[in-house]
Image: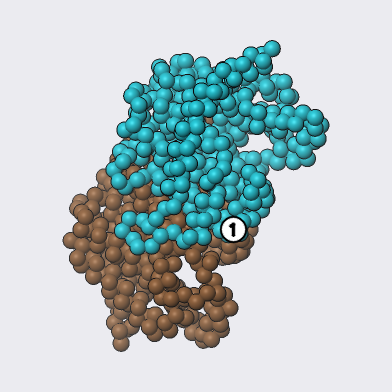
Chain colours: A cyan, B brown
Amino acid sequence: MTSAVVMCAATSTEFELDIWSGVRLAQVEQALQQWVTVDAPQGQNHGAPAHLLDAMRYAVLDGGKRLRPLLVLAAHEAVCHGDGVQTLNAAMRAACAVELIHAYSLVHDDMPCMDNDVLRRGKPTVHVQFGEACALLAGDALQALAFELLTPQDGSVPEVTQAHLCALLARAAGSAGMAGGQAIDLASVGLPLTESQLREMHELKTGALLQASVVMGAQCGGPSAQAVAALQTFGAAIGLAFQVVDDILDVTADSSTLGKTAGKDADNNKPTYVALMGLQASQAYAQRLLAQAQCALDGSGLARTQALRALADMVVNRAH
Amino acid sequence: MTSAVVMCAATSTEFELDIWSGVRLAQVEQALQQWVTVDAPQGQNHGAPAHLLDAMRYAVLDGGKRLRPLLVLAAHEAVCHGDGVQTLNAAMRAACAVELIHAYSLVHDDMPCMDNDVLRRGKPTVHVQFGEACALLAGDALQALAFELLTPQDGSVPEVTQAHLCALLARAAGSAGMAGGQAIDLASVGLPLTESQLREMHELKTGALLQASVVMGAQCGGPSAQAVAALQTFGAAIGLAFQVVDDILDVTADSSTLGKTAGKDADNNKPTYVALMGLQASQAYAQRLLAQAQCALDGSGLARTQALRALADMVVNRAH
């Protein structure tokens, strides 16, 4: 029953979200196309080598759900009183910067010394296509490029905003954020984790960047302290929900092979929410997190939260 | 004769530089000790995993000439009219940030898919000590930490300065800087390079971060446009000189085995200045670059350039 109600709620916002996100996704793709062709730094005559740029573009363009950029733009719109045109450039840069961090993490994750994946989104992974050394450097350069995007030298983003965005992104990406979460993940294979340890791993590995996406988007629009606090709670809830749902989908995506899929999880010795608390409890937990996220928006003092709410719905009620 | 004069000049400044740099090196080590133990990001309860931090500290602490931090601090002092105490925190953060970028690049460079080195400064390399996956993540996290250091949340560095420093560091580290230079280096093995191609590779691979060190240090002290331009020229000259001298030392460091060492270069198929223009011409080129660097300081309008001059001397006239 609960599940059916939620499905209805998801369906009722689906069409609007499609329209809203369709426009923004096109803008994000266009911006990434433009910005992942960095030219020479100011005052110098040389540019980046073509081979490296090819690998960077291959890693970033034409793929992915772009959930993080959409969260940035939705949070920006929630905070802006008018249409947010004056600060849209900053928000679009923040949107692309978080996507670059996400993209670089996938490039490095896929490498032989990490997950050793040869396919991503149906294409050969970057190290398969360009070689390991080039993949390593492309990931490194994508991380730097994220901070380049946040610090334009053309006056289009106030320097105070640039500093805030860099501060948020660096902390979400680093040892107490994404990279730290990946290190815990590596160290946890085959080990029994408690729920709090599993949550901490995911808060860092996936949650920190999802939460930063929301807060960075808001930061571009000049948010109130109340709004920032609410959006931090919102971001933390959907960040965790994202991972719980990932674990659920690992098991339920093809229900006819449930036994086999569960067996695969066990083979990989990866701790998951489903393994820890069971499927039904995991599903209920994801819904509780969604309710927490929506509740945070209720107390945010923000009026235009439809896009954020719809994205949260999508995160929890997605089918893949 | 020229060489002897230069040796004398180097010797005359050596003692002062030792005293000057001894104090600063101790401060840099202390700051790195303090900052490469990042704790939880603001408002969160968790910190970075110990294993990752161990690898990061192993990569950064207790090793290296710290040339880049010293350049940052020397440029900062050159620009500051008083003692620079008000902006010393910013300069020390910049000094440590460039060192973190340098350290992460060594960690990734040493990995099997790159240079596959097992020893650095007499110790096992990071991937040998901690495993490849941990080395990869430690490098990634060190890059992020550099930007964390530049964006303190305690009001100690003006946000405008934070933004400028992030902008400079991101461009020096990225695809049109250090990472780009490494990609050209990888792609150039076994290929004949012209002098301009060799210079471009080194301007990116080593020069960009050395130049950024000088400019970032100056930026902390509020430099004039004239000073920035002069320091950019200075930084570019010593950045290139650093590499020319590296190539010279590869051949001359043990002159009794000159033939063998030259043979090693050829075996590695790495383009060098000595291979391209010969030993004597390379030595003369290094001295010309030093003269260019000193000349840039003459026209900088800056009074306190002794430390920068002495560091430039050291870069060109070092024995190892």
Along the viewing direction, whichever of A270 and A133 lies nearer the viewer: A133
Subunit under mark 1? A
Furthest residue to the top? A1
| Residue assigned mark 1 | A130
Q: Position of residue A173 (x, y in %)?
A: 50, 41
Residue A73 visible in the displayed image? yes
Along the viewing direction, whichever of A42 and B305 lies nearer the viewer: A42
Residue B61 visible in the displayed image? no
Judge from the rendering whether residue A264 lies leftward or rightward of residue B227; answer left or right.
right
Vertical order, A181 against B317 (above or below): above
Query: Which residue is at 45% across, 21% downward?
Result: A305
Query: Which residue is at 43% across, 33% downward?
Result: A216
Vertical order, A158 against B228 (above or below): above
Screen quadrant of the N terminus of chain B = bottom left
Query: Which residue is at 50% across, 27% downward?
Result: A19
Vertical order, A273 against B118 (above or below): above
Along the viewing direction, whichever of B70 and B189 lies nearer the viewer: B189
Q: Position of residue B23 (x, y in %)?
A: 35, 57
Query: Which residue is at 32% across, 77% downward?
Result: B287
For the residue carrying disc 1, how many other residues have a C-alpha within 10 Å: few (<14), some (14-19), or many (20+)? some
Per the image, label 1 sits on a secondary structure element best described as helix
Amino acid found under the numbered disc labelled 1: Phe
Q: Position of residue B118 (x, y in %)?
A: 61, 64
Instruction: Give the quadrant of residue A164.
Output: top left
